[in-house]
Amino acid sequence: MRPKSSTLTPNELEMMKVVWGHESAVTVRDVYEDMRKRRPIAYTTVMTTMKTLEQKGYLKANQQDRAYLYRPTRPKQQVVRAMVREFVDRVFNGSSRPLLLHLIEDDRLNEADLREITRMMGKKR
């Protein structure tokens, strides 16, 4: 049975970041141990979520001995780009301008961030 939505939940994205952070394939145990350092989580929750990520097409599993090894099917940058595009479509009706204005007005951007954005905008022209 395929999940209803292919969009990543916050918990799924957190697990994908762990998977992307490893150089090689990971087991459920690898992800569980990494996530446990950050917050309490059940092994079965990690296992179920990774199975869901496989069903959604974000992970590919191969059995090796008694464990499954998981690898991402898409690079992080590609997934993040699609998530941002989906967000802009959903929240700003496909227009990037309101998002950019919001980010520029946000107090979290420091001078170095603003300089980098300005540099990138000049390069884009």
Image (tube, helix red, strand yellow):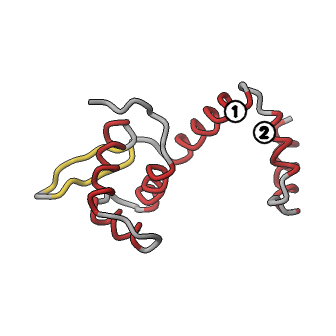
Q: Look at the picture and state if 53 lies above or below 32.
A: above
* Amino acid residing under circle 2: Leu
The residue that appears at 37% across and 36% down in the rendered structure is: 56
Q: Position of residue 11 (x, y in %)?
A: 46, 53
Q: Look at the picture and state if 27 lies above or below 119.
A: below
Tally of numbered tags: 2
The residue nearer to you, when weighing 12 against 85, is 12
Say if mark 2 contacts mark 1, CB within 8 Å: yes
Circle 2 residue? 99
- Looking at the rendered image, the quarter that the C terminus falls into is top right
Circle 1 residue? 91
Tell me where residue 108 sits by quadrant. bottom right
Q: Earlier in the sequence, mark 2 or mark 1?
A: 1
The residue that appears at 48% across and 50% down in the rendered structure is: 13
The residue that appears at 41% across and 66% down in the rendered structure is: 35
Tell me where residue 96 sits by quadrant. top right
Q: Position of residue 47 (x, y in %)?
A: 28, 54
Drawn side of residue 119 relative to residue 50, left or right: right
The residue that appears at 44% across and 49% down in the rendered structure is: 12
